[in-house]
Amino acid sequence: MKAIALVTSGGDAPGMNAAIRAVTRLAYAEGFQVYGFEKGWEGLITNTFRKLTPRSVGGIIHLGGTILYTSRCDAFKTEEGLEKAAQTLAENKIASLIVIGGDGSFRGAYALSKKTDTQIIGIPATIDNDIFGTEETIGFDTAVNTAVAEIDKIRDTAVSHERIFIVEVMGRTRGFLAATIGLAVGAETILVPEVKINEAEIVRTMKENTAKGKRSGIIVAAEGVKSTNKLMKTIEKETGAEVRFSTLGYVQRGGNPTARSRLLACLFAEKAVELAALGKENSIAGIQDGRITQVKLEESCRKEKPSSPQLVALAKMLAAYYRRQPKNTLAMS
Ligand code: F6P
């Protein structure tokens, strides 16, 4: 019987368990045995796994986190670690390794692919949604919904106290999460690492809002934006408004996956097992224009996902509700 190794690596993302369940059951149907390696790459280095069966992955589709555990494994970044992992794959006669994780995990998988003949397949799962080759990753939708629910609560205080809140969301060095959350909560301003902060413009927006009778505001900032502290002081000084800072933190990573995150997990798993059955290229599953696709692992690791400035622009337009002017002047309607 051919064997598939399954590992969840890097930051946990809601929907990883749904992917574990789907991979195991689909692989079993294809005649594979499934070895679930524990604690991310660490499990491959220490050869720690348990056999997964269709029954053993029952009752987990709705659970956040990962039943296989995960880690950020420094040892895997060394030649020795990679060689040990390759040895584990060889010893257990693993035909295909399926990695459920984010961009760091895929870079690790690519490094490992140079040391092993085992086919490597990636299933994108990260709340950051920053993987090249897929419009969405498992867990992103859940994190967006969690953050939106939390910021809606923060808005109650913002409105009641007539305060401006800068709410920091995750996303590492990219702004996909912040842009989507910001648009969905009706943020007055969205700050993403891809765009330099324009303090003067933000202050002008806040002043215009006050002139319109709007006395509170939400600024959604990606964690990759480093100058929020300075911005807070500038807004306070220039507008006289009370400004508060709130970090959402790890609540964004946990919780039951949304239907959309579970669905994506099932669809990516189907593609991953199909690729394992073919047994050829090192690839990742992706979604493009509503279709499940295959992207080369190397390509996904080498290229950077383009950012989506239209979300930030639309949020700005919706929050300001001004007429578009040919000369880029802000006319109040
Ligand atoms: O990649 C997911 C993520 O939650 C990022 O948004 C965040 O920057 C990072 O992981 C936090 O990493 P750690 O789990 O190592 O604290």
Image (cartoon, rainbow, N blue to C red):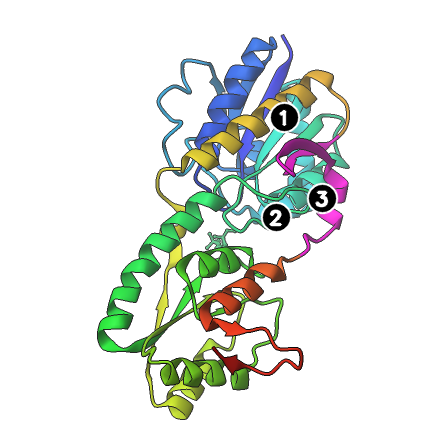
Q: Is residue 72 above or below residue 36?
A: below
- Would residue 37 be visible to someone looking at this image? no
Looking at the rendered image, the disc whose residue lies closer to the viewer, 1 or 2, is 1
Q: Residue at x 27, y 60 (%)?
A: 153
Identified by mark 2, the residue type is: Gly
The residue where tag 3 is placed is 300
Secondary structure beneath dot 2 equals helix
135 and 130: which is toward the camera: 135
The residue where tag 1 is placed is 272
Secondary structure beneath dot 3 equals helix
The residue where tag 2 is placed is 104
Q: Residue at x 47, y 85 (%)?
A: 203
Q: Seen in the image, is 321 located left or right of residue 249?
A: right
First of labels 3, 1 by sequence position: 1
Identified by mark 3, the residue type is: Ser
Is 287 one of the magenta-colored residues? Answer: yes
First of labels 1, 2 by sequence position: 2
Q: Is residue 175 above or below residue 329?
A: above
Secondary structure beneath dot 1 equals helix
